[in-house]
Amino acid sequence: MKNIFALGLLGLIVSGCQHPGTQFNARVYDQPGATNAAQLSLQGFPSTNRFDAALLQPSPELFTLGPGDRVEIELLDDLGSRTTSTVGPDGKLYFNLLPGLDVWGLTLTQTKELLEQEFAKFVKTKPQISITLRDVASKRIWMLGRFKAPGVYSLTNSVTLLDAVMQAGGPANFSGEKDLSVANSTDDLADLQKSFLIRKGKMIPVDFQRLLKQGDLSQNVYLEADDFVYMPAATSRDVYVMGAV
């Protein structure tokens, strides 16, 4: 299973590093007479960690609901009406007398207005409805590898890479809690130089070493839904397959 998991992520990395009109050819860099420049310059892979400055700004878009998100809904003049409802796989939300309302892609304010509009068809006075987000399942980020608490985390608002790393417990053994004088003790140490962030199949050239060890906030990009952050072990040669395998 681990070997199968390995092959997929390798394919994801290679495909994410390609650009239109360029392809990575490993043979070019494996020739006996290859120059140092050729060995250090991979086609289609950024040789610098510079990226669009917009990545350092929070997204102006408001959170929108999706399948799996849980919200608490209540009629303000009826305390007994409070209930928690989950957006279904079809994007519909059910509350009280209302039929399923399509809220997929709506903000909380838009959902509140839709609920009040539809509920007004069943009552004489204009209803006032409150809606509160309780759990997010439609937008997630993957924090895997040598984190102290690796896993899949919900993305509810604007989160920076540094925030997400701390949420995942930080890099394993980053604080030096393990005695590195012991043989093979670096097996569990996170390798910041080989860590990476992938977004929509493309690698974002973040320098984790500068961000986490030097405190360089110019590398602290904002994350988006479905971002994949991976920290390999210092001596690891494993690759992992992600997705429906």
Image (spheres, rainbow, N blue to C red):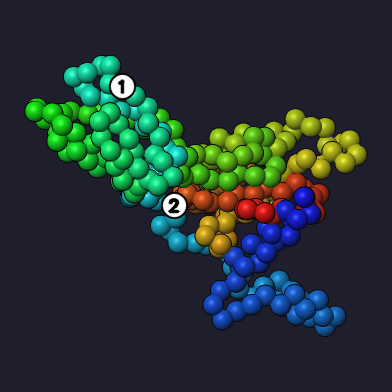
**Badge 1 amino acid:** Arg
Instruction: Determine the image quadrant of residue 64.
Output: top left
Tell me if residue 62 can be seen. no
Counting residues from the start of the chain, the first of labels 1 and 2 encountered is: 2
The percent coordinates of residue 143 (x first, y second) are 60, 44
Question: Which residue shows up at 67% across the image and 75% down it?
Answer: 24
Q: Residues within 10 Å of mark 1 (few under 14, many from 20)?
A: some
Question: Which residue shows up at 31% across the image and 22% down it?
Answer: 82
The percent coordinates of residue 223 (x first, y second) are 48, 49
Secondary structure beneath disc 2?
helix
**Badge 2 amino acid:** Leu
Q: How many marks?
A: 2
Tell me if residue 149 can be seen. yes
**Is residue 133 left or right of 68 when viewed as pictured?**
left
The percent coordinates of residue 67 (x first, y second) are 43, 43
Question: Which residue shows up at 62% across the image and 34% down it?
Answer: 169
Q: Look at the picture and state if 51 lies above or below 84.
A: below
Q: Tell us which disc is closer to us: 1 or 2.
A: 1
Q: Look at the picture and state if 70 lies above or below 209.
A: above
Q: Residue furthest left?
A: 124
Q: Residue furthest top?
A: 79
Provide the residue designation for mark 2.
Answer: 56
Question: Which residue shows up at 85% across the image and 80% down it?
Answer: 32
Instruction: Determine the image quadrant of residue 38.
Output: bottom right
The percent coordinates of residue 179 (x first, y second) are 82, 32
Residues 44 and 201: in front is 201
Provide the residue designation for mark 1.
Answer: 82
